[in-house]
Amino acid sequence: MVQIFRSTAQKSAKSHSLNKIIELDINDLDHQGRGVGRYNGKVCFVQGALPSEKVQAIITEDKKQLLTAKLHKILQVSDERIEPNCPWFSECGGCQLQHLSYAAQTQQKQTRVDQLLAKQGIKRLPWQPILNSQPFQYRNRTRLSAWYEGKQNKLHLGFRQFNSKKLIEVDQCLVIAPKFSTLLPELVQILNKLKCKKHVSHVELNSAGQRYCIILRVLNKPAEQDYIKLTEFALAHNLDIYFHQNDDEYLKVQSDSDKLYYSIDSLQLQFGLSDFTQVNSQANKDMIQQAQNWLELNEDDVVLDLFCGLGNFSLPVAQKVLKVVGIEGSRSMVEKAKRNASDNQLTNTEFYKQDLSSIDGLDKIDWGAFNKIILDPSRQGAMQICQQSEQWTAKQVLYIACDPNSLARDSQYLLASGYKMIKIGLIDMFPQTSHIETMALFSR
Ligand SMILES: C[S@@+](CC[C@H](N)C(=O)[O-])C[C@H]1O[C@@H](n2cnc3c(N)ncnc32)[C@H](O)[C@@H]1O
């Protein structure tokens, strides 16, 4: 008979290993920023440990091929270890790398991309200089969890703990816009004065555009008094505050209705609070500039911008080329991209709504019409698209990846179609975190 239950002996060996203190060498960082070593033939992930360190760690999880452990003591300290600036760093799940020097963070990210592409047989990458960001105060969007504690009749704001549902209350955050960080204690105070405080599920902070916006996600319709209190707070701090109750409905507590827009050089791009916008405004501008430089745009180019969003790449590119066609899955973003083009007097753009993960959608694209292609997919990547790359006439393809795993997978299809990777560079869009953004240029 096939044994499907673990024997009692196996079970008890596992339970004995829990809480055991082990000693190991750390030689890598994983995609969540955890130190990686080996113990008794198993891979062991130790949160808080760094490559080149020797540590003692307490086993918290014992699976067939891997262990998870908590850092207990550092026996040999990495030269790159620094004191984290944030008092909540060891608990809060928002940042994973504040204990690593900024230069080493980007170097580690580059190493990780090297490793992932090497696994697919893509080696000796043509690395370009890293596009660094300011290490703190760079985030223009963040979401705080809110939770109501019945016994004390108190609302708390914070972030989730690493790999857990537990919430860590914070009254400042070093990676978000400084105005928001300074305002957090007063924001919690005012929220605690609201009738609807029990029904606030989370709070979003958005300074992607010209205004500082606070969005309160509420489960029930707020009372009139709440509008009055929040309007006073908004006026006192020069903020816009919105209630977000249903999917696309954002109700501004003040009555004026300013449009939101962000700038790229002389262009102004309108966006909505539910739209995708890049989280790091300066890194976004640098990324767009690098994209234009790498593509060596000229006035004869006809460019296809896939996953174009609101026109973040399409519009600056349109200023330099004959024509840009942008394709995007969200109808409302396509409408905004069109309006953004006309508001900026750009007459050489077209935008279409299309699901770029469906073969039917891809069949409608006239691939032969473009000599340059920009791909900026979400984390899932652009596999279905890159699988069709054989039929492309484009000489150059620029791939911007927010997940290096997708880049590694999709690069294989491009290389198989005769493209060569001629440039690759890290864009440090998310300092202090383990997120990796990469730009790669392919040519044939
Ligand atoms: C990483 S964002 C990039 C947006 C834009 N290029 C920018 O820089 O702001 C990815 C975009 O892909 C869109 N998207 C996601 N899945 C899609 C799909 N299956 N088909 C078409 N667009 C999709 C999202 O709506 C989002 O606007």
Image (tube, rainbow, N blue to C red):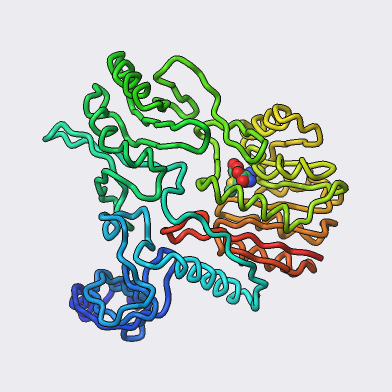
For the residue pair 366 and 78, the one nearer the viewer reads as 78
Q: How many marks?
A: 0
In the picture, which quadrant includes the C terminus? bottom right
Find residue 54 and report its image quarter. Answer: bottom left
Residue 4 visible: no
Find residue 317 and report its image quarter. Answer: top right
In the picture, which quadrant includes the N terminus? bottom left
For residue 301, side relative to residue 203 (left or right): right
Above or below, 352 against 195 in this view is below
For residue 347, side relative to residue 246 (left or right): right
For the residue pair 384 and 164, the one nearer the viewer reads as 164
For residue 65, side relative to residue 247 (left or right): left
Indicate the position of residue 427 as horizontal and vertical percent values.
57, 58
Residue 219 visible: yes
Residue at 88% from the left image edge and 48% from the top image edge? 300
Q: Which quadrant of the figure shows ligand 1?
A: top right
Above or below, 102 against 381 in this view is below
Instruction: Name, please, the residue furthest toward the left.
Output: 151
Indicate the position of residue 417 as horizontal and vertical percent values.
78, 66
For residue 402, side relative to residue 149 (left or right): right
Indicate the position of residue 369 as horizontal and vertical percent values.
86, 48
Find residue 17 and report its image quarter. Answer: bottom left
Residue at 54% from the left image edge and 31% from the top image edge? 272
Indicate the position of residue 211 as horizontal and vertical percent values.
48, 30
Residue at 32% from the left image edge and 40% from the top image edge? 182
For the residue pair 397 and 11, the one nearer the viewer reads as 397
